[in-house]
Image (tube, rainbow, N blue to C red):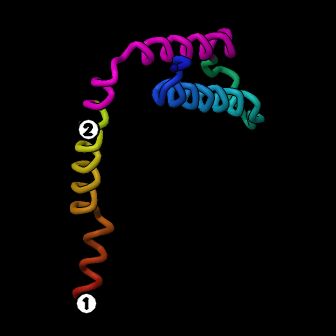
Amino acid sequence: MSNGWNFNSYLQLALGLMCLGGIIFLSTLAQVNKPVNTFSCPLMPVIPCIGILGNFILVSKIPLRSWVFFLIFEGVGLLFYFGYGMKHSKLNKLFKQIDRE
């Protein structure tokens, strides 16, 4: 018997709680030297919470097969991203130049 909670449910709950914690943390920070004419989100705690809830509902409707494809393509993309970055980084070129000397 399953109580309806699977890995995806726990993952979504954890991510939602992290987002909520981030919102609470950022909203409680002291705002030092805040300019007077800056943009502020209307209904600060309500709008982000509605966004979190809406995203949670949308993500919970995605089938497992889509998550698997997403993770595969995300992994391939990260391999390309970091592989290209390591090969073409200025720091890597600097280290190669130092090694030649």
Prevailing secondary structure of the magenta residues: helix
The part of the chain drawn in magenta is 41-69
Task: Give the labeled residue for mark 1.
Answer: 101
- Looking at the image, which is closer to me, 84 or 59? 59
Above-or-below relation of 44 to 101: above
Check disc 2: other Cα within 10 Å, few if <14, some if 14-19, many if 20+. Answer: few
Q: Is residue 1 left or right of residue 29?
A: left
Residue 87 percent across, percent down from the top left: 22, 62
Residue type at mark 2 is Ile
Task: Give the labeled residue for mark 2.
Answer: 72
Q: Is residue 68 magenta?
A: yes
Residue 54 percent across, percent down from the top left: 51, 11
Q: Is residue 75 left or right of residue 28?
A: left
Question: Which residue is depicted at the point 64% across and 32% down?
Answer: 22
Image depth: mark 2 or mark 1 in front: 2
Is label 2 in contact with label 1 (beta carbons under 8 Å)?
Answer: no
